[in-house]
Amino acid sequence: MLIRRCAVLFLEPREDLDIDWTALFAGDAALGANIRWMALAAHLGEEVEVSLEEMAALGGIGLTLWQERGDCEQKFGAATIARLLQAGLLIGDDAGDDAEHHAHFCERDEVLRSQNWRPLSATAHMFSRWGDMRVDKGMQFPSFEELVVSYGTPPGPVIERAAPADAVALPAPERAGLDDTLFQRYTGRNFDGAAVLPMATAARLLQRAFGAQGEREMAPGAFVLKKLSPSAGGLHPVEAYVLAQRIEGVASGLYHYHPVRHVLEPLAAMDTTQTAELAMRMVADQDWFIDAPMMVVLAARVERNFWKYRNHAKAYRALLLDAGHLSQTFYLLATEAGMPAFVTAAVNEIDIERVFGLDPLKDMVIAVCGCGKASGAQDTVEMRYEP
Ligand SMILES: Cc1cc2nc3c(=O)[nH]c(=O)nc-3n(C[C@H](O)[C@H](O)[C@H](O)COP(=O)(O)O)c2cc1C
């Protein structure tokens, strides 16, 4: 059997502090530090604790060339190699005793290799996803008052980099066309749980925020879309997936928005109890968002961006910026239609991937947006502009 190391692997010396109560009562130094080595392999997305022997093997077996398992066993020990294969940190080329097991890790490793991820970015992405993050599992929503009690006051909202006398005074901005929308925009946290989003509003919002306004062939077979937000390299890799709770003329459930054909492609039908439950799960129990009749998941098709920005130091940042631009355009369109909107990065990516059928190595869930009619209540704080 031939083996090699998985493509992307970082090792982190993780320090756990523990209090030694016996030493404490005996008056001795009571704080102990315990260091464990954690293997962060992007194709797994789950941490694996490794021993020093296993680290030596991972450092000695390359990620490119396949090597005879027997040779590696001689160098690093059969038990070490078996454990690393079992954990998926080493990849086996074929059957052996545990064919399915090896094939699974081999396939995940191949997917990762094929996308042209920057290793640090793949690791940051795969290990910052939440699954089933809920209030009863530790999700917290501290108020500003509680934060100040815990951390003291925050760094001030502004900084000065020159003496005031040296500063160049600027004229007050004149009122202009965008102002009404800009000043009315706010993050909604009190949606009307009964209101239905009119079809015309939903359609305009989706088309102007996520739809193509044109298509151009930049080189033979290389097509780009023109949209109303900027995108790194003009590639527009961020896809819009819709959770429809109450959109006029659209059955409740999950959809993919097709930016050229301007249609909602059905992925799963759900009754409204299921969509409400999923809405809550998607935004990690932020119940102030769940009454929004339409939520939109922003998920980047990484291979579209990484086609140009291969193994690129800035590509991951560009994907996050792309999603930010789309969400701002979404906010402004909702505002223009007389509705508040929201965006949140506090989302359960793993649950979202599961329901929409997304592979986290290919489809990077970044944020969830939503919008809908305001209820008029102020049960949860909002920051509206007050002249
Ligand atoms: C990247 C990002 C993540 C956000 N995440 C959350 C969130 O998890 N929960 C929430 O209630 N608001 C979230 N917001 C909204 C901000 O809290 C809000 O924009 C900010 O308080 C300013 O208020 P405004 O949008 O009404 O001007 C997020 C905004 C951004 C840009």
Image: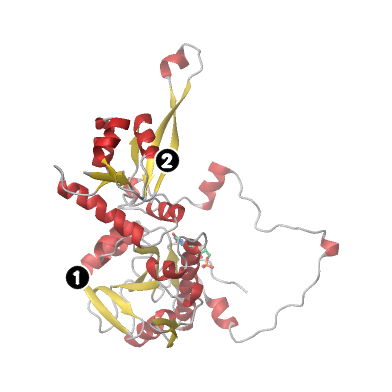
74 horizontally vs 216: left or right: left
Instruction: Tell me which corner region of the image, top left, top right, bottom left or bottom right, holds residue 163.
Output: bottom right
Q: Is residue 190 above or below residue 183?
A: above
Q: Residue at x 41, y 79 (%)?
A: 210
Residue 336, position in %: x, y? Answer: 48, 83
Residue 232, position in %: x, y? Answer: 50, 72
Say if mark 2 contacts mark 1, CB within 8 Å: no
* Crowding at mark 1 (Cα within 10 Å: few <14, some 14-19, many 20+): few
Q: CA distance from mark 2 to mark 1?
A: 45 Å
Residue closest to the eye, 132 or 75: 75
297 horizontally vs 175: left or right: left
Q: Is residue 192 visible?
A: no
Mark with earlier residue (2, 1): 2
Q: Is residue 79 above or below residue 273?
A: above
Q: Secondary structure at mark 1?
A: loop
* Crowding at mark 2 (Cα within 10 Å: few <14, some 14-19, many 20+): some
Q: Residue at x 44, y 35 (%)?
A: 14
208 horizontally vs 112: left or right: right
Which residue corresponds to mark 1? 271
Q: Secondary structure at mark 2?
A: strand
Q: In the rendered structure, which amino acid carries the disc numbered 1?
A: Asp
Q: Is residue 159 visible?
A: yes
Which residue corresponds to mark 2? 11
Residue 123, position in %: x, y? Answer: 41, 51
Instruction: Tell me which corner region of the image, top left, top right, bottom left or bottom right, holds residue 239.
Output: bottom left
Q: In the rendered structure, which amino acid carries the disc numbered 2?
A: Leu
Q: How many marks?
A: 2
Residue closest to the eye, 209 or 37: 37
In the image, which is nearer the foreground, mark 2 or mark 1?
2
Residue closest to the eye, 78 or 130: 78
